[in-house]
Amino acid sequence: MSIPVDIPGLNTIIPELGEGKLVIVESGADAAKSFFVRHMSLVAGRSDWPVTFLTSRDKDELQAQLASERNGTSLPEHWISIEERDAVEDLEEPARAGGLLAVDSFSFLTLDLAPDALARALRSLRVLCRERGTTAILATDRGMFDPRSEAIAIHLADGFLQFHTREAAEGVVRFLRVPKWMDGRFVDRNVYYEFDGHRLAIDLRRRVL
């Protein structure tokens, strides 16, 4: 089984998050990455996947965001377990069988880990994902990892999705890139998107230079 991405436009580029895979989603100040992780958690819940969500933010705030973004759709009872964390070293217990493990923000929660410890944690998580059929999606903040740790995270992930923003003459331009994906595809172009805090809209027709 897999979790459909279920975002028009984006699902033509990355149609699903595969079972047993490890995906990293990165952005700067733009909150699109956190929205995407919450969106995938809701999609997983609607597909009867149990969800474990580790957050460095307030648990009640996360619950309120998920409630507002579910758009009235019903979800299984006890579909999500939310844990507040200030740091994380061992992900064995949260990576339960057959579910989705969502972590926001992974780069903040692993700030105290040396690169070799981060590599061990990610390798262990990859093994657990494959053994238990758990899909893991880790949201990271650009610039929070040192260069070596960032290289380790990208190398060990099955998929890597980046949300970018930059100032242009017409205002803020938002675009995403998929430099690595689990089926071997690479999206070597900038894909325009809009995000208003409540909805992620992908425009495959607009070219971003």
Image (cartoon, rainbow, N blue to C red):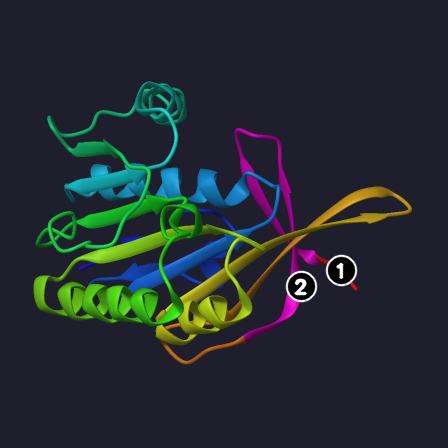
Mark 2 vs mark 1, CA separation in Å? 6 Å
Q: Amino acid at mark 1?
A: Val
The foreground one among 105 and 137 is 105
Q: Is residue 68 above or below residue 44?
A: above
The answer to whether 20 is drawn above or below residue 167 in the figure is: below
The dot on residue 190 is 2
Label 2 sits on a secondary structure element that is strand
Q: Which residue is mark 1?
A: 208
- Given residues 40 and 115, the one toward you in this image is 115
Q: Residue at x 60, y 41 (%)?
A: 30
Foreground pick, 164 / 143: 143
Q: Position of residue 79 (x, y in %)?
A: 15, 33
Q: Amino acid at mark 2?
A: Asn
Quadrant in the picture for residue 63: top left
**Percent of width and height locating residue 83:** 23, 33
- Could you tell whether 175 is left or right of 197 in the image? right
Mark 2 and 1 residues: CB-CB less than 8 Å, in contact? Answer: yes
Nearer the observer, 34 or 1: 34
Q: Is residue 5 visible?
A: no
Residue under the image location 13 percent in, 30 percent down: 76
Within the magenta stretch, is there residue 118? no
Locate the C terminus by quadrant. Answer: bottom right
Residue at (31% x, 44% y) in the render: 87
Q: Secondary structure at mark 1?
A: loop
Q: Residues within 10 Å of mark 2 (few under 14, many from 20)?
A: some
Residue 39, how many percent across, how many down?
Answer: 38, 39
Number of callouts = 2
Q: Which span is picked out in magenta?
A: 187-205
* Quarter assignment of residue 129: bottom left
> In the image, is 76 to the left or to the right of 152?
left
